[in-house]
Each structure stands twice: as structure tokens, then as C-alpha cells.
Image: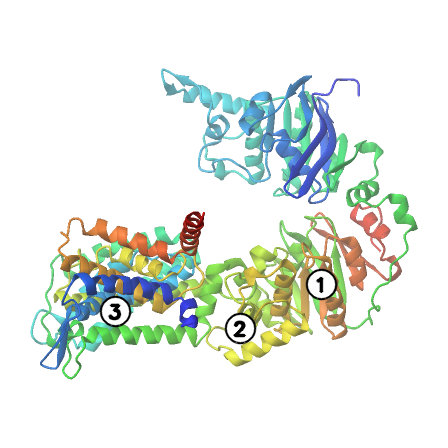
Amino acid sequence: MKRFKRSPLFWPTMGLCAVLLFDLIFLPGFFTIQLKNGYLYGRVIDIVNNAATLMILSIGMTLVIATGGTDISVGSILAISGAIVAQMLGPGQTARTPLAVCLLVALAVSAVLGCWNGMLVAVVGVSPMVATLILNVAGRGIAQLITGGQIPTVIYKPFCMIASYVPGMPLPFSVLIVILMFVLAELYTRKTSFGMFVESVGTNATASRYSGINAVMIVFLTYVISGLCAGVGGFITTSIIKAADANNAGYLIEMDAILSVALGGTKMTGGRFSLGASIIGALIIQSLTTTLYAWGVPPQVLPVVKAVVVILICLIQSEEFRGLLGRIGNGERKRAHA
Amino acid sequence: MEAEPILTMAGICKSYPGVRALSNVDFDLMPGEIHALVGENGAGKSTLIKILTGVEKLDSGRITLEGKDILPKSTQDAQKLGIGTVYQEINLCPNLTVAENIFIGKEKTKHGKIDWKSLYADARRTMKGLNLDIDVQKPLNSYSVAVQQMVAIARTLEFSSKVLILDEPTSSLDQNEANKLFEIMRQLRDRGLGILFITHFIDQVYEVSDRITILRNGGLVGHYRTRDLPKVQMVAKMIGKDYSDLVAMDRTARPEQEAAEKPFLRAEKLGRRGDIAPFDLAVGKGEVIGLTGLLGSGRTELAQLLFGIRRADTGRLVLNGKEIKIAKPIDGIRNGFAYCPEDRKAQGVIGELTVRENIIMALQASRGHLKRISRKEQEAIADRYIKALNIKASSQEQLVRNLSGGNQQKVILARWLATDPELLILDEPTRGIDIGAKSEIQKLVRRLAKNDIAILFISSEVDETLRCSTRLVVLRDKKVVGELRGEDMNENRVMRMIAEEVEQP
């Protein structure tokens, strides 16, 4: 327990528990899970399923932010990836192009877009916000071009299963994708020295370069990974709505992804990161949304309530704030004694 | 001097928490003179300037300008009084035009609009006054740094025209550009302006200045007429050794002399424009080569050129008979070089990472990120160097930013020793660390040299350099000006060389 308390996962987990505790007390039936035809259904399952895209995006975003950057193009890359898949599969019951080929092409394009971001930031030296703003804006246009201004629908069964259930597995398939992406990213960052180099470059880029680290390459790679994550996110989002909406798919999701990373405790200025903590951060955001809807908060005020809760969670995570609370508490106790 | 001084500062004192930055400094500036203010780093030059320009408030003392007491409260205030400053870094807007830069903030208006015609005419006249016939309607960044510097001066003169302070104006200029600046300085002097000139370049002090004021450790050493003060004496006064002492001083005990081994590394006419003039250097195993010279003399630039932080544009580097190309630090590391940078905090430590991670960083970087050193091996390496260098940390997993300066420096040393280097470059390895750690590092240098590691040792402290090195390379004004070995290695010779009074051996 003591070790867990020092782990980067501790405070994000506490935040998530706080939200879930609220649900447990005020929303009876929130945790009800039903088994129907061998598949699990329920609000909690919905949360995980709906958060899948965000969780995957938060993986790439964590790495980018750990180098001291930001990637605000992920929403647009997601839309492009979805548009490619939808366009290549076609609207029919059967696939125009084999599904695997569609997915690979979409992933390749996402990686190329990531390379573009990485080149601008790491090689050319454009500030990350500006560099990724280019695709943030232009990306939607590219997606429009791919879909020809339409919203192509997809009814091809195997693709639709991505965001729903696969025979023989009680959990939504997207959960499996999240786990797979997380394990891959965790292996790549922690079983090689990539993670350490990212933290090193994010902490002190000059010192890292002087130590022989190829900082340009490290930063470049984080944007490529972020692009790939957005590509995968595109599959899930498109699969959920069974259509590729160039304008609205993943609209503003980059903000939620950045927020997930912040909730996970990675500093916006770069340095130490934890992929697991960011994923919990993504779960906090989604469970908050689901909770507020379930509680009957009207959609118009939802962002306000969400903002307040997020600020609270961030404050609780901050060491300084906890120190302040502690001091105030002590002061009151002293006064009570006197 | 016959005239009354235009500016006097008397009994100036200034303390920062824990430090006495200036104590009882007097200074006066005549109209129509160029007055050089010199001193090593931390001597108090910049504090004095900051007080004069209203950036800092003085604790005690008086400043009088043309006989009247003044107390500048801000740079604007100082400008209004007639004291203008041009800083080392040009504080102008590069994408505005020359004219806009000169008059920004005091544009002439006609009917509420800027009167561009007369603004351009005025700007042209001002620049002509500085003997510069340029298109003032072009953006500033279309001109060289030297011209930009002139524009900065022009702007300052527009605002205030009694005292002009030039803070290291030549540090980013080449020789021709600097000469042009000097010409203008002389012109302005002849117009009756008092110019205060701050520079690290000794030759330039002697080229333009009429008088010199020397500061050391926050105190005044003295005022001198430039033509009455030999260069050697100026250097001695800056560093704080009396010239007569130097003559008498004996060589202190030094580690065993070099075995005159065959050099394994040779730099031939290696150089980079603006950083360091082409130089030759041969390095043998087990040698400790001290690089000495004043601040800004090119010591760090030379070291960084070898290691690959700066890329050479002329000459070649030969390692064990084979020419090698070094374009970035990793090339240096793969050839067995290591570099402990001067600015530990900004360039050395990676504060958010642990002691263990910091120690294995360079070794891991040389292997690339895919071939990770196993955790067990990492711990073994970290453990070995923590013990060998006596690093005081609560554990290997302590964050480096929580260590003391001396221990941080040792961690960086450990990082480089872990790569098993053949050439170790130490750039100011003992700056800002306590005496204990300092002597430990000096001892380590000798021990490493015994193990056949070649060391380039850079230090501002001449004593320390003499004590640690087997040979000295002297630099001045971004040039290697000579080498000292054996009997010639004493402070007297070093200073003479720094001040250019001895022909190269």
C-alpha cells in the first residue's frame, strides 16, 4: 500500500474512485451489469467502451507531452483515418477492399501525418502548438476530400464489431484494442530506453543532446506514435457511429486527450510520464460524462460541471495544494486547542 | 583631466541577499572619453551598470550627472536623464523597419497619424550621422548584426545623448565589424559624448579606450589611463595577483610530467568561423592539458568543437592515424570522447531523472535506445561509480535535482566515466562547488590521467589549472596563442601570454 501511494497511479486512481463513489451513493443501479447472450452490458461497460478512443489517444499524447510538446491534430488525424477506412470498405454488406488492407492503409497514412508533425516540431523547430494546428485545421479538409463531402456509412459486419462485441468475448472488442495498444506502448517505452530518453529530453533537452541522445529523433518518434494512436482511434470512432463524419468525428477530442494526460499527473512542461495514469485520466473524464448524464445534468451545462470537477481533481493531485490544506487543517486544530 | 566629469558615481554599495556585489566603488566619466570597464566574471561590472541604468537600486552612494544628483528608477528614467544603454543582445524588433526601430515609442504624428515622410527623413539623417547610408525602410533583419548594433546605438542616441553605455557590443561581431563600431565610437567621443565600454576583449580595450576602470570581487581596483597601464598589469589586476608577486612566484608542485607519449589525437587547423580560429592540437595518452584564457577567449568553443556540439567548418581531426568526422555529440562519444559541460544545471544534469538514470545516460545513448542496458547492469554501473566517486545520495533512485552541486557534478563525471572515454573534457568542473568536492575532483583528474585517459581541463582559476595540468594551451580572443610546458608553466608566463607580451615559443 505504501508503495502504491508513491506510485504515479495513486492520485489518478483516487480521482476515479471519488467519481465512482459518487455513483455508488447517488445513482442506484449504476454498477449493474447484465449478461445477455454471453455479452456483458451496463453503464460501466459503456464507460470503458466509450472511453476506448480517448484512452488510446492519451497514450500517444502522454509521450508527446512528456517531451514538452502538444499534439492538437489527433482529432483530425482520427477523422482522416476513419474516412479512409469507410471509403475503402464501401457502403455495402461486403467489403470493397479487404478489411486488413483498409486498416493498414489508414494506419500508414496516420503515421505519415504523424511524421509531418514530427518533422515540423523536431526538425524544423516550429512550436508544437502551431505545428500541429496546421493539421488540426487542414486535416478536416483532407478528410472531407476523402469522403467527397459526404458522410459515408459502413455496415460491413466485421468492421462494426470493433466497437461492439465479437462472438466468444463478453467484453466489447475495443477494450481488447486498448489493452493491446497499452501493452505495446508500455513494452516499447519501458523495455527499450525510449521512455527514459523521452523523459530525459522533456526534462532537459540540451543536457540530453550533450549526453549523446538524438533528441530530434526521439521527439519525432513521439509524434509518429501519437499519429498512429489517432489512426487506431479513428477505427473505433467510425465503428461506433458506423459512419465517417469528416467534420465531427473526434471533434475537440485532442482537448480531452490533453486533459487525460494532465489528470494522469504528467507535467505539461515535460519530464516523467506514466501511460497507465493517463489511461486512468481518460477513464475519469468518460465516467464523469456518463455520471453527469445519468444524473440528469442538461447537456448545455455539462461542460461547466465537468470543468469544476476536473479542477477539483487537479487540485487534489497537486502536492502544493495538499500541503496548503494540511497547513490550514493544522492551524484550525491549534486554534481549537487554544 | 581639465574638464568636469559628466557622470560621477561615488561610494556605491550594493548587496544581494548573502552577497556583497559592490562595496564602495567610485567611478567617473568625462565628456568626450571612451572609458573601459573591465573585470572577471562576478567582479561587479554588470551590477554597476544595472544601478546606473535604474535596473537595480543602490544601497548607498551617490550618482551625479552634470553636477546634479540623480537616482534612476528605471531604464526609461535613465534614458530621459540622458543615459542610454546598448546591450549585448540587441533589444530591437527584427521584423520592423530600421526607421521604425529607431523611433518606436516616439513617432512624430501629423493630424493624429504617423508622419512617415519626416520619420524616414529623420532616420536617414540619424544613420548618416553614424556614417551609415542604408535603406531605413527595409526591415532590420535584412542587415548584418553589426548594422543592427549601429541601429541600436542610433536609437539610444535619439533618446539620450549625454552618456552611452555599450555592454559587450562586440561579442557577436567579427573583426571588420568591430572596427567599424570603434570608428563610430571615436566619432561620438569627438562630439563630446561620454562612452562607457564593457568588454572581455583586452585588445579592444587598448584599441579604443582612453581610460580603464578595473573591478574585482565587487571592489574597485583602480582607474588608469590606458596608455599608462601595460596589458600584463591589467590582467594581473583583474585576476588579483600583483605583478611583482608574479615575477617572484615559484612554480608550485605539479603532478608527474608527461611521458612525451605519441599523440593519439590530432586536430589540424580545426576551426569554426566566429567561434574559434583554426588551431592545431595534439593529445597524448595520460596527458592533462589545461586550457586557459579569460572568459570568452574560446576555451569552451574549442572543447565543444572537439566533442561535436559545434561543428567545425575548417580543418580535420585525426584519431589514431585515421581522419574522423564529428558533427554531433554522439559522434564524439562513439570515438571515445566525453564532455562535462560548463553549465551544470542547463547542460549537464537531467534533474527529473534518478541518479542511476543520469549515470547510465551517455552509455545508453551510445548504444541507441533499442539496446537497453538491463536494470541489473544499470544498478551495477551506478553502484560502482557512486562508490568510486563517493557520491552522496540517499539511494540510486534519488532524483538528481535534489543533490548538492558537488554531487551533481560527480554524477555527470560518473556518466562520462561509464562510457570508458579516451579523452575526457572537463569544462569548469569545479565551478560553484564546495572546497571538499573541489579537491576530490582535482585528485580524480590526476588518478584518471595515470590510467591513461587524456584530459582537457578548462578552468578560470589559473592556480587550479596549473596544479592539475601537465601542459597548458593559452587562448586569447578566440585564438590559440601558444603553449606552455615544463619550466614555463607559471602564472607569470600565463598572464603575459594572455596579455600578449611574449612571442609564441
Foreground residue, A185 or A263? A263
Left or right for B31, reference A36? right
Give the residue number, with chain letter if any, for mark 3: A232
Where residue A289 sits, quadrant-wise, is bottom left
Q: Which amino acid lies under the numbered mark 2 shown in the image of this protein?
A: Gln
Give the residue number, with chain letter if any, for mark 1: B456
Q: Residues within 10 Å of mark 3 (few under 14, many from 20)?
A: many
Position of residue B379 measured from the top left corner of the image (x, y, whole percent): 55, 77
- Give the chain letter at badge 3: A
Counting residues from the N terminus, which is met first, the one under dot 2 or under dot 1? 2
Q: Which amino acid lies under the numbered mark 3 shown in the image of this protein?
A: Val
Position of residue B390 measured from the top left corner of the image (x, y, whole percent): 67, 70
Give the residue number, with chain letter if any, for mark 2: B364
- Tell me how the rendering is colored: rainbow
Rounded to the nearest angstrom, the CA distance separating label 3 from label 2 is 31 Å
- Helix or strand or loop: what does disc 3 sit on? helix
Question: In the figure, A48 relative to B195: above or below?
Answer: below
- Helix or strand or loop: what does disc 2 sit on? helix
Left or right for A254, reference B221? left
- Give the chain letter at badge 1: B
- Helix or strand or loop: what does disc 1 sit on? strand
Foreground residue, B146 or B5? B5
Foreground residue, B6 or B319? B6
Q: Which amino acid lies under the numbered mark 1 shown in the image of this protein?
A: Leu
Question: In the figure, B184 relative to B343: above or below?
Answer: above
